[in-house]
Image (spheres, rainbow, N blue to C red):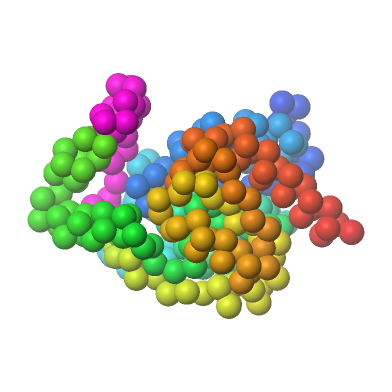
Amino acid sequence: MGPFAVLEAMPVSGVPERWPALLVPGLTGSKEDFIAVLQTLAQSGRRVIAVDMRGQFETAGPEDPRAYTCAALGNDIDVLAYTIGGGEPLHLVGHSFGGLVTREAVIDGRTKFASYTLMSSGPASIVGVRERAGRTMLAELPEFGLEHIWHTRMEPEVLAAGVPDEIIAFLRKRLFANSPTGMTTMTEQVLSTPDRCDELTQVEVPTLVLYGEHDDGWPPRTQSEMADRLNAECVVVPGAAHSPAVEAPETTAAALTRFWNAAEARLLG
């Protein structure tokens, strides 16, 4: 399967007393999207790991498009989760496209999950403004490459948002490190993934749907309806948009910790 780049946080004591957690980023993201919550989450007594998926940033990937389907990436996550947990239960979080990927691991994998969180994700392919952006990227990426996507799409957006220069430099470096084949296939996947909520309900894993009140990915109403279908807890993060772990890290970490602790308490009886 090859090595995967990760960021890891441990409790201050260095001794985890609770089940670990694995955090999976979205399509154009990376493990760094969770930096602001990692140590806070670890303070509750658990090992917390954020990962770059295959072909993302610091994890290498092949030129075979089949390696980047939701099913293939979900199998990667299943193997990683099983390895990290050592066969014991593990908390799984998928952000945005990472939610569609991790759902595959929950439904079709062998790992026993202590809980599952869909963060700013949805029941099926993405819609709205991000769908349009995805279709534009899918049309332009094979012909013009990542540099074109950066200069015409991403750089103007971050400049307009007043993002600090050092963060802009990181975002540029991260984009150019991605596999173009991976980006293309994952974009196709986020635009075409079918609804698997009915299958997910059969797994009977404690589930949380968490999203920002101003999410511009899957509409908040769609995510709320998904939570109802899954009989899942639902947390709306005030002031946040599509990246609650970045935009409201303390609120997001508190919600995850509370949910994880409650899931463990139920499972342990």
**Left or right for 86, reference 226:** right
**Left or right for 167, reference 147:** right
Q: Position of residue 202 (x, y in %)?
A: 66, 77
Question: Quarter of the image holding residue 263?
Answer: bottom right
Quarter of the image with the C terminus in it: bottom right
* Residue 34, above or below 144: above
Tell how many labels: 0
Residue drawn 71% across the image and 61% down it: 206
Q: Residue furthest right?
A: 269
> Which contiguous range is marked in magenta?
158-183
Q: Residue furthest top?
A: 165
Question: Quarter of the image holding residue 187?
Answer: bottom left
Question: Quarter of the image holding residue 42?
Answer: top right
Whether residue 194 appears in this view of the structure is yes
Residue drawn 49% across the image and 36% down it: 246
Q: Position of residue 215 (x, y in %)?
A: 45, 49
Residue drawn 49% across the image and 67% down it: 123
